[in-house]
Image (cartoon, helix red, strand yellow):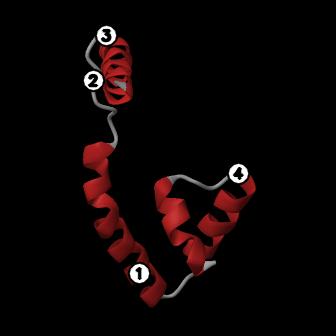
């Protein structure tokens, strides 16, 4: 069950798996709790990427136009 700690911290477990890991954590030893906290600390930088970046209006259209221009240029 200790191999599911990262999945637990990332919120990647379904209902049954989540319940199993939470039960495991309720009765685990100090070493497992220490590993859980180390994993939690290691994942903190990911929070900076939790909000998707804002995409400028028209980016997809401008990108397609630019790709088309490059393809036409290379054919010539």
Using a 10 Å C-alpha cutoff, classify the residue at mark 2 as few (fewer than 14 neighbours), some (14 to 19) or many (20 or more). few
The one nearer the camera, 56 or 32, is 56
User: Which label's residue is closer to the chain start, 1 or 4?
Assistant: 4
Q: Seen in the image, is 25 located left or right of residue 44?
A: right
**Disc assigned to residue 26:** none
Inter-mark Cα distance, 2 to 3: 12 Å
Quarter of the rendering occupied by the C terminus: top left
Inter-mark Cα distance, 3 to 1: 46 Å
Using a 10 Å C-alpha cutoff, classify the residue at mark 1 as few (fewer than 14 neighbours), some (14 to 19) or many (20 or more). few
Using a 10 Å C-alpha cutoff, classify the residue at mark 3 as few (fewer than 14 neighbours), some (14 to 19) or many (20 or more). few
Farthest front residue in view: 76
Farthest right residue in view: 16
Q: Which residue is mark 1?
A: 35
Q: Nearer the viewer, mark 4 or mark 3?
A: 3
Inter-mark Cα distance, 1 to 4: 23 Å
Quadrant for residue 59, please give it.
Answer: top left
Q: Which residue is mark 2?
A: 54
In the rendered view, would you say 63 is above or below 8?
Answer: above
Q: Residue visible at 39% across and 27% down?
A: 75
């Amino acid at each position: 069950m200790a191999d599911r700690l990262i999945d637990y911290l990332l919120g990647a477990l379904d209902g049954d798996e989540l319940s199993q890991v939470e039960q495991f954590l309720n009765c685990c030893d100090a070493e497992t709790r220490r590993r859980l906290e180390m994993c939690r600390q290691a994942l903190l930088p990911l929070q900076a990427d939790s909000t998707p970046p804002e995409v400028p209006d028209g980016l997809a259209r401008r990108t397609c136009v630019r790709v088309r221009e490059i393809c036409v240029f290379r054919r010539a």
